[in-house]
Image: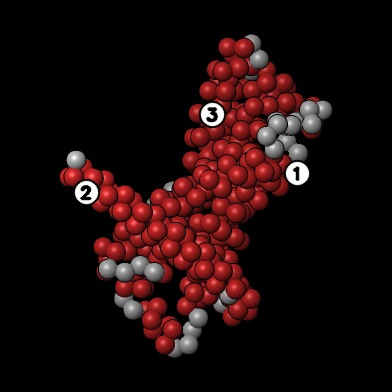
Amino acid sequence: MTDTRIRLKRASGATLGRLKGSFEGLDGHIMFGVKMFAGIPMAIARYRKHILTEVGNISFGKASLLSGGGTIGVVGGMAIVAAVMVSIEIHRALGLLGFTALSGLAGSIANTQAIAPLIASLAIAAKVGTGFTAQLGSMRVSDEIDALDTLGVPSITFLATVRMLAMLIVIAPVYMVGLLGAYLASRFVIVGMLGESSGTYDYYFRQSITPEYFAYSILMTVIFAIIIAVICCSYGYNAGGGPEGVGRAAGTAVRTTILTIALAAMVLVFGLYGLTPTIPGMGLE
C-alpha cells in the first residue's frame, strides 16, 4: 500500500507539473502574440520590403515547381482530395434516404463552413508554420536574434510580425484557390462520376451559399492563420538546445497548432453559423 501511494503521489505530482508548465507556456504565447500585434504599425512603416519577400516565400516558396507549387499547390491539392472523399460519403448517405438530389446542398455547406477552412489551415500549419518555427529557431540557437537585439532592431517585430502580416496577405487568395478546387471537385464527383443531374446540383448549390456565410468562411481562415503565425513563431523564437531543440520546437508547434485550430473551429462554427442549420435561399432560417 505504501508503494502504491508513493507511485500515485509521484504520478499526480508529475501531472500537476505538466499542467502548470502548459499554463505557463500559454501565458508566454499570449504575451508573444500581444507583442506581435503591437509591432504591426512599425512593421508596415519600416519593413514593407521584407513583408513582400515573405509573401512570395509563403505563397510559392523556393523551387515551387519541384515542391508541388508551393503553399497554393498544397492547399489546393488537399482541398480537392478532401472534397472528393466528403462528396462520395455525402452522396452515399443521402442515397440511403433517397435524397441524392440534395448532394449539392450538403456538399456546399460542408465545404464552405467546415472542410475547406480546416483543410487549408492544417496544410498551412504543416508547410508554412513549421518553416516559421525552423527559421526563427535556427536564428535563436545561432545567436542571430541576440545580435538583432544588440543592434537595436526589434526582433519580434522584424521576424515574427513581418511573417504574420505576410500570412494575412496571402491567406485569402490561397484559401480561395482551395475552396474553388473543393467546389469543382465536389461537382465533378457528384455530377460527372455519380450521374446526378447538373441542373439540380447547381440549383441546390446556389441556394445554400450566401455572401454572409462566404465571409464567415474567410474570417475563420484568417483567424486560423493568426493562430498559426503566433504559435509557430513563438516556439521558434524561444527555441533552445541546439538543432535538436529546434526540431522538438517544430514538432511541438505543429501539435499545439492543430489542437488549437480544432478547438477554435468548434467555437467559430457554433458562434458564426449557430446550433440550428439555416439555409436562407430555401427559406430555412
Q: Amino acid at mark 3?
A: Val
Q: Position of residue 230 (x, y in %)?
A: 51, 62
Q: CA distance from mark 3 to mark 2?
A: 50 Å
Residue linked to disc 1: 212
Q: In the rendered image, which quarter is residue 171 located in?
A: bottom right
Q: Nearer the viewer, mark 1 or mark 2?
A: 2
Residue linked to disc 2: 6
* Observer-nearest of 209 and 145: 145
Q: Position of residue 118 (x, y in %)?
A: 54, 43
At label 2, counting other C-alpha atoms closer than 10 Å, the crowd grade (few under 14, some 14-19, many 20 or more) is few
- Residue sitting at the far left: 3
Q: In the rendered image, which quarter is residue 206 located in?
A: top right
Residue at 62 percent across and 12 percent down: it is 97
Q: CA distance from mark 1 to mark 2?
A: 58 Å
Residue at 52 percent across and 48 percent down: it is 261
Q: Amino acid at mark 2?
A: Ile
At label 1, counting other C-alpha atoms closer than 10 Å, the crowd grade (few under 14, some 14-19, many 20 or more) is few
Q: CA distance from mark 3 to mark 1?
A: 23 Å
Is disc 3 placed on a helix, strand or loop?
helix
- Of the numbered discs 3 and 2, the one sitting upstream in the chain is 2
Camera sees residue 78: yes
At label 3, counting other C-alpha atoms closer than 10 Å, the crowd grade (few under 14, some 14-19, many 20 or more) is many
Residue at 59 percent across and 30 percent down: it is 186
Residue linked to disc 3: 86
* Observer-nearest of 241 and 96: 241
